[in-house]
Image (spheres, helix red, strand yellow):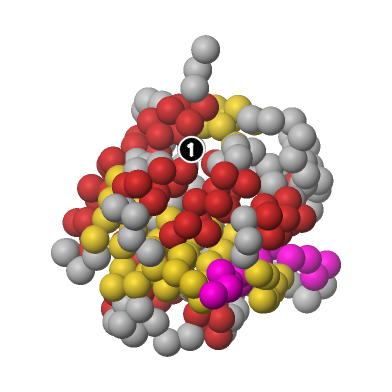
Amino acid sequence: MTDPLSANRRNWDARAGIHAASSFYRDRDSSYWFAPFEWDALGDVRDLDVVHLQCHLGTETIEFARRGARAVGLDFSAESVRHARELAGGAVDYVCADVYHAREALGERTFDIAYTGKGALCYLPDLPRWAREIAGLLRPGGLLYLVEFHPLLHALGPTPPPGVDPGQLVLHDDYLAGRGAQRRDSAHTYTDGPDLSTDTTAYEWRHGLGEVVNALLAAGLRITDLTETDILPWPRWPQMIRTETGWWRLPPTDPIIPVLYGLSAVKDA
């Protein structure tokens, strides 16, 4: 029987080189990957210890380092970590480990900020365990900042069913958990560049917003802010228009829906 997490690791190893060579990543400064509202929550990170979990190529990790943080990125894909180190040029420390074993892999270090998201949670089957691991990584008073694609975005699906206008928003997938691992088999990856030639199978788990919040509360973290927004760093649908920050949103004639959210949670002293 296939282990979903092992299949995902192989899938991300196969993606890493394509992503690292893509204009999707290469042609954008590390500052691009932060929504405008994120720095309002994160504040000045100078001289703070920051861990970026499930960092992939570490684009956001690099920006933390540029802003003066002592930044470390963690990802379970050895190929992603290898490319992240090359892109950072030694400015960031990267560790290869599963997020469920982050504390052990990081030598029981603690941090002022744990940052994660933008396509991370859908690869985790067990959110309570994830939340406990984060609580253990944070110092008293430390901040978790999660920026994640809204579960409604997943429910609308990456592509509409056959025969449906690609610009039409159609419910296509689950919003809530309940079906367990969902198997995806596709050679296409989300950046420009060639298709995958191997390891095209990946597994995802759906997590509603309530499930995320309740997992963090159960781990002893206190939710301090929740922002829902209608902007994305790339055009998910063909009718999306570029904003003044370079990100994308649906045109004014379309419904205003949340496609991304930012959540702050604090570990009380």
- Which residue in the rendered view is the most extreme toward the left? 90
Which residue lies at the image location 57% right of the left edge and 53% below the top edge?
A: 131
- Which residue in the rendered view is the most extreme toward the top? 1
> Magenta includes 87?
no
Residue 218 at x, y percent in the picture: 68, 55
Residue 59 at x, y percent in the picture: 36, 64
Looking at the image, residue 67 sits to the left or right of residue 187; the answer is left
Looking at the image, residue 75 sits to the left or right of residue 238; the answer is left
- Mark 1 Cα-neighbour bin, 10 Å: few <14, some 14–19, many ≥20: some
Residue 163 at x, y percent in the picture: 78, 37
Which residue lies at the image location 60% right of the left edge and 40% below the top edge?
A: 126
Q: Quadrant of residue 257?
A: bottom right
Q: Quadrant of residue 204?
A: top right
Which residue lies at the image location 78% right of the left edge and 44% below the top edge?
A: 176
User: Which range is magenta?
Assistant: 254-269
> Magenta includes 256?
yes
Which residue lies at the image location 35% right of the left edge and 35% below the top edge?
A: 14
Amino acid carrying label 1: it is His
Q: Compared with residue 70, is residue 121 higher up or lower down, i.e. above or below?
A: above
Residue 28 visible in rendering: no
Q: Quadrant of the C terminus?
A: bottom right
Task: Read off the residue under disc 1.
Answer: 188
Residue 144 at x, y percent in the picture: 53, 67
Q: How many badges with numbers are in the image?
A: 1
Looking at the image, residue 61 sits to the left or right of residue 178; the answer is left
Q: Compared with residue 263, is residue 188 higher up or lower down, i.e. above or below?
A: above
Q: Compared with residue 265, is residue 102 higher up or lower down, i.e. above or below?
A: above
Q: Quadrant of residue 259?
A: bottom right
Q: Secondary structure at mark 1?
A: loop
Residue 125 visible in rendering: yes
Looking at the image, residue 183 sits to the left or right of residue 26; the answer is right
